[in-house]
Amino acid sequence: MKKLGKLTIFLIPVGIAVNIVGGQIAILLKLPIWLDAIGTILIAAICGLVPGLIVAGITQLINAISLPTILPYMIVGFAMAVVSAVFSKRGFFDTFKMSLLLGLIVAVVTTAIAVPMDVIIFGGFVGTGNSVIAAGLMAMGLSVPLAVTISSFTFGLIDKVLSVLVCYFIIKSMPTHFLAKLPMSEALLKRK
């Protein structure tokens, strides 16, 4: 593993703070989305996999202080870091359309990981806005796994597409000389 540079070490806490603040805004505004992964996606996209994993892990540990039941979802954050780093290298932050597609990919991956945990660990009722929708779908006769999948994917799609697009616009607004200093600069600049 390559040594983390000073800029990356500086950006990791920024990514964690963005995650925490985004999540708190969603909670305070009682939004049915989370907004707590923008920092993970951004840092993985511009600094690489390991920094993205660090941001995801520390964010979950901090959030678990007040809500320990979310600790198993650390794996969802890790998945977002992996997908963001891998697809950043493939140019998915180059265009708006590619970023939209990446948001869809992140939503599919995270839903596929989170739904089994929602169903197995919590019986489908996590205590978020998703749970209310899932309960409504169950009342209409859908099975727990199907109701949770539909609810999670619907809100996850909005959340992840929005999060990826925020990162896209942040990356596009970064000056070339700053991007050149980042670990993922080769991927980010070759098409800029």
Image: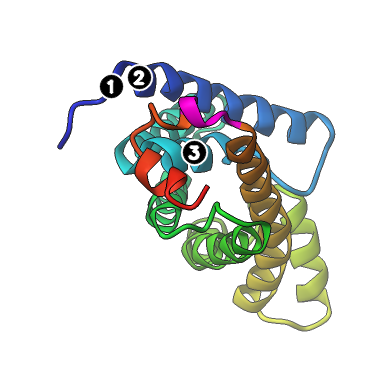
Disc 1 is placed on an element classified as loop
- For marks 1 and 3, the one nearer the N-term is 1
Q: Establish if 56 lies above or below 139.
A: above
Return the residue at label 1: 5
Return the residue at label 2: 9
Residue 32 horizontal/vertical position (percent): 78, 49
Q: Are marks 1 and 3 in contact (CB under 8 Å)?
A: no
Quadrant where the image shows the N terminus: top left
Which segment is the magenta one?
A: 174-178
How dense is the environment of label 3, judged by Cα within 10 Å: few (below 14), some, or many (20 and up)?
many
Question: Which sits in the foreground, 48 or 69?
Answer: 48
Amino acid on which disc 2 is placed: Ile
Residue 13 horizontal/vertical position (percent): 46, 19
Q: Are marks 2 and 1 in contact (CB under 8 Å)?
A: yes
Q: Residue furthest bottom?
A: 141
Amino acid on which disc 3 is placed: Thr
Q: Main secondary structure of the magenta part?
A: helix
Return the residue at label 3: 40
Amino acid on which disc 1 is placed: Gly
